[in-house]
Each structure stands twice: as structure tokens, then as C-alpha cells.
Image (tube, helix red, strand yellow):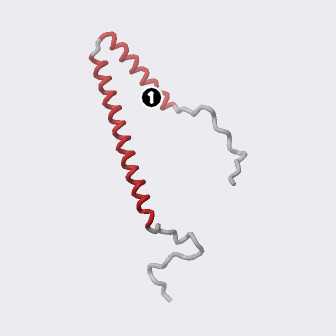
Amino acid sequence: MLQADENVSPQPFLPAFSLRWIFVVMILIAVGISVYMQNTIDRTLLIVLALMGVIACIFVLLSAVIFLVCNLFGILGEILDSSKQQPQSPFAGDRLPPQIVPRKE
């Protein structure tokens, strides 16, 4: 049974954010404000950015689906090949690994 270590501090309720993520959020907010300002002036930029966002979302969705399908094939392959004997570590027991080159005596 595992015991808790007294030296480990408890996890915080909220995750810690790095400055990199804060800058990314700031840039996204600035782009959103600029899109809103351009929306009041010209709708062409809004249409182009919306189309780019939709294409990016479709790309991410298709990538996730392809990854999940490939992962599923890998899992199914492992399940179907489970009948084969898996290689064992020669160091798992109290014996030496087999010698490739015979010892000189």
C-alpha cells in the first residue's frame, strides 16, 4: 500500500499559468478586438478570418480523428497479437542473460 509523503505540498486548486500562456491570451484578445473594430468598418476581413478559423477547426478535427483511428488500430493489433509470447527481460530473474559470444576458458 502506498503511503503519502509528508514533504509533498498539496496541489493548488487552480493550475499555475506561465507568462507564455498569458501573452498568447493577450494576443488573441487583441486580435479579437481588432476583428471587432474592422467588423464595424469592413466585413471582408471578418469573412476571411472566420473562414480561416473554420478551416483550422476542420483541420484539427480531422487530425484528431485520424490519430484516434490509428491509435485504435494499434490497440487492436496488440490485442490480436497477445497470443504471442512477449519477450522477457533476462534480468527479471536471478539468472544471467544468455551469452552471445562463448567465453574463453
Q: In this picture, is 32 found above or below 93?
A: above
Mark 1 residue type: Val
Q: In this picture, is 39 found above or below 6?
A: above
Q: Which residue is mark 1?
A: 24
Where residue 89 sits in the image (x, y, percent)? 51, 69
* Residue 22 shown left or right of residue 38 in the figure: right
Where residue 49 sits in the image (x, y, percent)? 31, 23
Quadrant position of the N terminus in the picture: bottom right
- Figure quadrant of residue 43: top left
In the picture as drawn, the residue positioned furthest to the left comes out as 44
In the picture as drawn, the residue positioned furthest to the bottom comes out as 105
The secondary structure type at the circle numbered 1 is helix
User: Which of the two residues, 53 or 68, is positioned nearer the viewer here?
Assistant: 68
* Residue displayed at 47% across by 27% down: 23
The residue carrying pointer 1 sits among few (fewer than 14), some (14 to 19) or many (20 or more) residues within 10 Å by Cα, namely few
In the picture as drawn, the residue positioned furthest to the top comes out as 41
User: Which of the two residues, 57 or 18, is positioned nearer the viewer here?
Assistant: 57
* Residue displayed at 57% across by 33% down: 16
Where residue 101 sits in the image (x, y, percent)? 44, 81
* Residue displayed at 37% across by 47% down: 69
* Residue displayed at 49% across by 78% down: 98
Where residue 45 sits in the image (x, y, percent)? 29, 18
Q: In this picture, is 100 found above or below 53?
A: below
Q: How many marks?
A: 1
